Amino acid sequence: MGKKKQKIILPPELPPEVPDEEVEVSDEDLDFVGQHSDYANFMSRIDTPSLTKHVSRVADANEGALELLYEKKLRKKLENKETEENTLEVDPIDALPLKTADGQLYYRRVKESKEAADDGELIKDPALVKPTKAEKRLKTKKLRKEAKKQAKEEEVQQTPQEEVLDEVKKELTAEEANEKKKYKFAELGTTLLTDPESNIRLLKEMLEISKDGDSAIVILGLKSLLAVFKDIIPGYRIRLPTEKEQEMKVSKDVKKMRFYESTLLSAYKAYVQKLVALQQQTVYQQVATRCLCTLLAAVPHFNYRESLLAAVVKDISSQDDVIRKLCCTAVKSLFTNEGKHGGEVTVEAVRRIAELVKGHNCQLHPDSLEVFLSLSFDEDLGKPERSDMDKKAKYKKFKKRKGSDESNQKPENDRKKSRKEMMSKTREEVNADYKAVSSDQDPQEQRKMQSKTLSAVFQTFFRVLKHTVQPKSEGSAHGAFGSHPLLDPCLNGIGKFAHLIDLDFMADLMQCLRKLAGNGSKSEDSSENSSCQLTVSERLRCCIVAFKVMRNNLDALNVDLQEFFIQLYNLILEYQPGRDDGDLLAEAMKIMLCDERQHDMQRAAAFIKRLSTFALSFRPAESMAALVTVKHLLQKNAKCRNLLENDAGGGSVAGAIAKFQPQVLDPNLCGALASVLWELNLLMKHYHPSVSSIAATISTMNANTNQVFRVHTSPQQAYTELLKENESFATPSAIKRTNSKRKGSDTVPAQGSDLNSPGEIDETAIRSKLSEHFSLLRDIQENERLRSEMDRTTQSLNLYETYRKQKKKRKTRSD
């Protein structure tokens, strides 16, 4: 080890090889060869034939194969030389030689590559030389890397069965954890319900568990917390103590109650905030909305009811049916159970709904406004407060009398005055405490809240009417619920609370209803309102509401309702049974025609004629309602019974108009008294027995006798009753079919006859026949079209031929 390393002197490098093509022979080279020709004599002595013989031994001796053979031999020689030259023997490393089996001695030598020799470094045999620390570290690193690679390869090469087993184990552990959480919820809930004051801290633990990532656990947590809060929330609003109150010394019971209330309020606040946040997610939307609605309906008096109300009213017009129904039922429960909250929540809910209608430009679901129909008001709310005025007047009179008596009497002592003042103060304090504790509300405050609620409701109704009356632009798109979805609930609400409307707004309301009833008709204003035409049912509802408003305020109104009679007269012809609501038509007949005391004779005759014609062309229910109305009108107007006579001129009473004009829009100008009710003769032969019987009773009414006919049913009742009967009523055609079925079953069918009875129709055969029929019609139309095209082409060809002939004639003439 102490010996010095010997430097190895390597031979010089050979010059680079140059290909024959790049060698250039100059004149100097030729002169040199000529001068030294003795050295080039070996070239003249080369035996070329022997070389060719040697080369010809190789099979397929051609130039390419020979070159490849020589190249292979040269490569082998070069490889052997490189292996020999790359290893050099250096000085012996051991002092003593080794002896082989043959008896020869040799020294072990270190092999060194030329490249390492050039750098002056030796490559030692690792088996002979001890490795250094750095080399050991490198070895260990390599071994670790190889072990990691093998482990990864083993993981990749795992069987799919092991992976499935691992997944199953994970699922089983997750299910076990979920089961534990469920049992934990049940345990915490039962302990809270048994003793809420001592275990109120468990609410926070339940809230923490409900923050799990699993949706099932979250839903279970929300429901269990809902049940707990519904049970433990007190029947009063919690007011937290102020800083001054906290500094005061109190008893242990008060401290315990304060801790219980503060903990309950903080947990309830966190729960409500979580519900509002989860309401925005589709997975928990229905559950969160259900919890919010249940809390609002159960504890509307408790804290944070504003956040609950805002979250519920926001989704009152949701497109999801379940969420919308939940919100509507919660709001309706607030309106019907005002004893729980005293009416304050009702005012807030109505205002929020009014703001929602205003913000969405009246484009909401009809259910969002139908909740107003659940409101209830005092009957004397719209009337002025005369009782208070009377009380004030009586108090003034009493004061004057008392003052006159006191002037006559001696002045009282100061002690008596102070005693009276003390008594009045104590009474006021006692009354205030009684109002705060008692559930009964002050009637004046209740009246104020009801007036606020009523003003907000009518403000919303008038906004919807104004939005419907306003003409819309052609490019305005309808909402998701139609062009005016809130009109029907608005009209129903106005009809229900018509007796509470202020008289100052009556004229504007009637004018608006008159426009809406005429909207959609073929009148002068039809071009203006063509963009917002109402249906027949909506226009009938406008007429009904107008008559309800007029009837409830009969003493203070002086309104001409002729326009509404004209609209009803025309709407009878526009009515379609499947499209429009027949119950509304029957209600309009009852309110406008039957409930009125007396009608003009021309108008009554016009409606009698129009309703009789209407009864011929519609279903039995509508026909029955129309005939009941006709009977009412004939009973009240005896002179209209002349229509039952057979004279062409309508008997002795024909009126100013001598001829009946059914196309006239105004019933007063159509001249119905000059006609005859020939429709009754056809209605007496109606297939429905109820319709035929009432037509027969009407036809027996005589104009000469003063008979009194009582109508026991209204048109609306007749419509509903006959509509129910029609479900089980069989038409004569159906009866004939059933009879033919029975006859066919008794007799044996003849040969070649169809086995199917007339009642049992083969739908496939009918479809095939109809398809063949319509395909034939299509073929005929196609043939006609092709023939017309062929005629056109032939005409064009004929024209072209005539043109060519004329052209040839012109050429011949020119030549």
Image (cartoon, grey):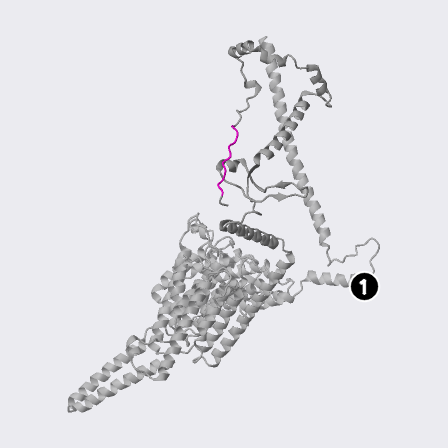
Instruction: Residue at the far top: name it.
Output: 815
- Residue 701 seen in render: no
In the displayed structure, 718 sits above or below 388; it is above
| 650 over 372 or under it: above or below | above
- Please give left or right for residue 674 compared with residue 238 in the image: right
Q: Position of residue 320 (x, y in %)?
A: 51, 61
Q: Where residue 557 appears, x then y in whole percent?
A: 37, 66
Spot occupied by residue 102 in the image (x, y as percentages of width and height): 68, 41
Amino acid type assigned to the residue bearing label 1 in the image: Asp
Q: Secondary structure at mark 1?
A: helix
Task: For the C terminus, give its image quadrant.
Answer: top right
Q: Count numbered badges in the picture.
A: 1
Residue 405, magenta (yes or no): no
At horizontal 62% and vertical 14% (from top left) the residue drawn is 42
Q: Which residues are magenta?
A: 3-12
Q: In the drawing, does residue 445 fall left or right of residue 153?
A: left
Q: Nearer the viewer, residue 691 or 445?
A: 445
Rendering quarter of residue 435 = bottom left
Is 754 positioned to the left or the right of 512 in the image? Answer: right
> Is 4 within the magenta?
yes
Res 62 quadrant in image: top right
The residue to which callout 1 is attached is 746
Residue 460 visible in image? yes
Q: Quadrant of residue 385?
A: bottom left
Measured along the vertical axis of the image, is residue 84 above or below residue 351?
above
The residue lying toward the viewer, choosing from 448 and 599, is 448
- Residue occupying image coordinates x 61% and y 18%: 804
Residue depicted at x 72% and y 23%: 58
From the image, give the main secondary structure of the stretch colored magenta.
loop
Residue 524 in the image, given as x and y percentages of width and height: 43, 50
Q: Say which residue appears at 41% left-offset and 64% top-offset.
A: 353
- Taking depth in this image into account, of 312 and 735 the one nearest to the observer is 312
